[in-house]
Amino acid sequence: MHELSMCESMLKTLAAEYERSQAGKKGSRAARVIRVRIVMGQIHQIVTESFLLAWEALTPGTAFEGAALELKKIPLAVHCRTCGWEGEIEAPFFLCGRCGRGAVETISGNELYIEDMEIADDEPEGI
Ligand SMILES: [Zn+2]
């Protein structure tokens, strides 16, 4: 499953980010991650539902357990070198929306990165 391996490598990156953010905080309890936002271009053809399932399967027992995951999809847009057309297309067919030629270059839709990660800094105070 494409989404599962994608989610696994995303979590590796997230875990490294998380470790970095916690490195300077000595003595405090392990902070929980509340929210993660990931930006994904349509070129990666990620099925949101499958990715969320993978996330639910992989996060229990980690700092990301229970964190809200938001996927932001970026449409795949191209520029046609033949006729100059620019617009959104559907992966995996890289053809111009006007002239139908394949000489197109990607303008957007390649993205794959972590936009934001919210971490609960406050330790629970004996409640
Ligand atoms: Zn064209």
Image (cartoon, grey):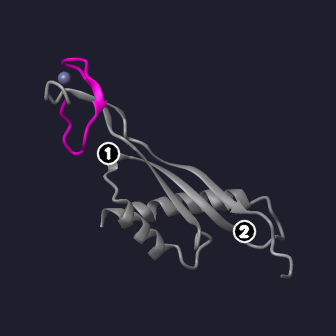
70 versus 4 height, above or below? above
- What secondary structure predominates along the stretch shown in magenta? loop
**Residue corresponding to mark 2:** 31
Say which amino acid is labelled 2: Ala
For this rendering, which residue is in front, 98 or 78?
98
Q: Earlier in the sequence, mark 1 or mark 2?
A: 2
Q: Position of residue 37 (x, y in %)?
A: 54, 54
Give the SS element for disc 1: helix
Say which amino acid is labelled 1: Ile
Q: Position of residue 127 (x, y in %)?
A: 83, 82
Residue 24 relative to residue 48: left or right: right
Quarter of the image where ligand 1 sits: top left
- Which residue is located at x 65 percent, y 65 percent? 33
Query: Residue 127 lies in magenta, yes or no?
Result: no
Q: Based on the displayed image, in which of its 4 quarters is residue 109 positioned?
A: top left
How many numbered markers are drawn? 2
Q: What span is colored magenta in the figure?
A: 78-96
Give the SS element for disc 2: loop
Question: Looking at the figure, which quarter contains the N terminus?
Answer: bottom left
In the displayed image of the protein, which residue is found farthest to the top?
Answer: 83
Alpha carbon separation for disc pair 1 and 2: 34 Å
Query: Within 10 Å of the Cα at label 1, are there few (<14), some (14-19), or many (20+) other Cα atoms?
Result: many
**Residue corresponding to mark 1:** 43
- Which residue is located at x 62 percent, y 71 percent? 63
Q: Marks 1 and 2: CB-CB under 8 Å?
A: no
Q: Based on the displayed image, in which of its 4 quarters is residue 88 positioned?
A: top left
Residue 114 relative to residue 21: left or right: left
**Numbered mark located on residue 67 in the image:** none
